[in-house]
Amino acid sequence: MSAEQAAPSYRRQTRPPPWRDVRVLRVAGQALFLVLIAWALWFLFTTLLTNLRALSLPTSFDYLEQPTRVDIRDTDFNPSQPVKDALAVGLLNTVRVAAVGIVIATVLGTVIGIARLSRNWLVRRAAALYVELLRNVPVLVIIIFLYTAVMLRLPPISEALEIAGLVVFSNRGLNVPWGDGVGNVGAFTVALLVVAALAIAVARWRTRRSDATGEPSHRFLYGLGVLVAGVVVAYFALGQPVAFTAPVLDDRRVTGGIGLGPEYAALLFGLVLYTASHIAEIVRGSILAVPKGQTEAASAVGLTSWQRMRYVILPQSLRIAVPPLANQYLNLTKNSSLAVFIGYFDLTRITQQAIANGNPAPQAILVLMGCYLALSLTIALFSNMANRRLALKGSR
Amino acid sequence: MTRYTLTTLLLVVALATAACTSGGGGEAGDDPGLAGGSEVAAGAPSGESEADTGGSGAAAGALLEEIRSRGNLLCGVNEAVPGFGLQNQEGDFEGFDIDICKAVAAAILGDAEAVEYRPLSAEQRFTALQSGEVDVLSRNTTWTASRDGTEGVDFVTTTFYDGQGIMVKADSDFQAIEDLEGSPICVLSGTTTEQNLATRFADIDYEPVPSEDVEVLLQSFEEDRCDAYTSDRSQLAGLRSALPDGADSVRILDEVFSKEPLGPAVREGEADLFDAVNWAVLTLIAAEEFGVTSDNVEDMTSSEDPAILAFLGQAGGVEGAVLDPGLGLEPDFAVDVISAVGNYEEIYERNIAPLEIPRELNSLYTDGGLLYAPPYR
């Protein structure tokens, strides 16, 4: 009897009152935290709204439909087009610099990272010097230096270099031959994509065959052959939809071809040089993180130092390198906003221009943040996909 | 798993939004950092009052009182335009717009030196004014309809009538704007200059080369990245005088293709401050009309002319007693203003005449210009 009475009281003790129950407290704590955040957001939002209204400033996003009233270089953009079109041009320009920059910075960074581990004293020291020099200088300084001290010091237009009638080179840019669409460009683009897919498929088939039979794959040669043949066939089959023009220098003006402006070049190379110094350190670190036994084992089976790096060390170090690399890609993309200082028409510059021309700053910056957030999340998405693919099976 | 990802995403977006909503005011709050050590720290306690004005836009109309209790005027200025707003090698600010700041400080506080200058970029200036970072913007700012309408600022009387022009190298072949077909043109970003350029060149093919940094832009022009440099003509004259190759290395084309009335601005809804700043400016013009200068202002306080006595806040004026027009200023504020900075002509001679800009529109109406002060009575 007394034992039965003791049991419930014991059970009651295992379920303490809610204000002492860890599980309840945990949920309540998180709920409280959420409420606090929501309250803070609401407070900031209403403060902004009150202040905007007090100053009779617009609180809507109607400005996106207003005419831009300024020009954008190197486009067909018309000042009467709405602000949102200008932002689209800016986004495209940001992507142009970020995508190209990421590719070049990765290649350069990997080469320098490997060079830092070289047995050659000179190579090793030169790579270390590069990293220490560029990593420790603000990227804005590098960009402004490249623009004012390198790009602007190229020959002026009156002394422009003309090479074989194909290239015009001055401090107003590098102009090279380029194709202008004169026919069915859409169909030609689709044909190019099909040909590229075909070339990749052929290269893969060669790889599989090589794996199965042991005969040399020559996948690169096969792929390239298919690509060139396919492009030529498509070009003539569609009635030459693209006309090629070479740049021509006429007094102080260059017509025809396509130009790579000094602003784009300064921004691109500034970002690449800076980011590559960080990527080099990531590459070096992730190579050193591969256990030494792997190198020794690779040497033991008779691989050359190139093969050892290519087939044993780099694939394993890539797994370690992906998360910090993605970080650097994000940094490069966001640093491209420094374009404002040298007048490259990126997303930030177009936004600042819009603000300066009487469009509401809070809304414009909100849109700007949204755009960068979207870009960053896209990069994060790809890096997560790569990470998942590279992760060791069974690991988390 | 997906549910948590979504929640995280939402949180991230929410945080980004929060960071941004505060960004409206916070953006300007970053400016002091940008301006860095170049500020002339005239009053230490200004930090506190800034936070006040930034947070409470609701307490409108009280800014004049706040300036009095704070004891100094926060003036948003230019730091790199010779003649108008320039920080010299001793770190002091000088120029036409700076003297306007001094005149306003003398009118409100009786002390022309009680000014804290805040160098602002073209892009920062309106946000700085809206958020209370500065009390008065005196930074060669063009008065336009959309700025009145959407930037939350009120422009007082125009202090300098300007127009946009184009500068080319002296040894180039460009004689008129039409010759610049296909040319790259350097232009300061974040200004009405960029819009005027687009308007004037609507039918002419050109390539805008913008930068928000005057130094970078000037270098682009000198290195021939651009064929021309466009800005307000007063700024062109100022920049020209500072070129390393001398003012004769460039040529300013004759055509003026915009109206640029430049003047101080205050935050919208600050009626008392608006009146004070407006009359500080009008006093400079009225003083020139009356012939009152910094040299003779003491003598003029015992003038025979009742209109001058009223203007200088002396007894025995038009009404017999001291005239207080109710501007919220001391009755004799004009004496403080004129003895500190002189009249309009003196300010012009001191700052702008060295740039060899003729007065033209910026003369008194009696000389065929546009300067006209309402009667002081």
Image (cartoon, coloured by chain):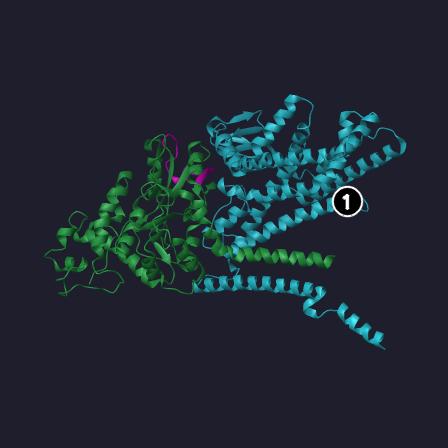
Q: Which chain is green?
A: B
Spot the residue most to the right: A213
Q: Position of residue A341 (x, y in %)?
A: 49, 41
For residue B351, which quarter of the picture? Answer: top left
Q: Position of residue A221 (x, y in %)?
A: 78, 30
Give the residues in magenta: B170-186
> Which chain contains the residue that carries disc 1?
A
Quick one: SS at disc 1?
helix
Q: Nearer the viewer, residue B337 or A147?
A: B337
What residue is at 53 percent from the left and 29 percent from the top?
A: A169
**Mark 1: which amino acid?**
Arg
What residue is at 27 percent from the left and 38 percent from the top?
A: B354
Q: Nearer the viewer, residue A231 or B159?
A: B159
Q: In the image, is residue A271 part of the stretch drawn in magenta?
A: no
For residue A307, which quarter of the picture? Answer: top right
Q: Is residue B201 visible?
A: no
Spot the residue most to the front: A2
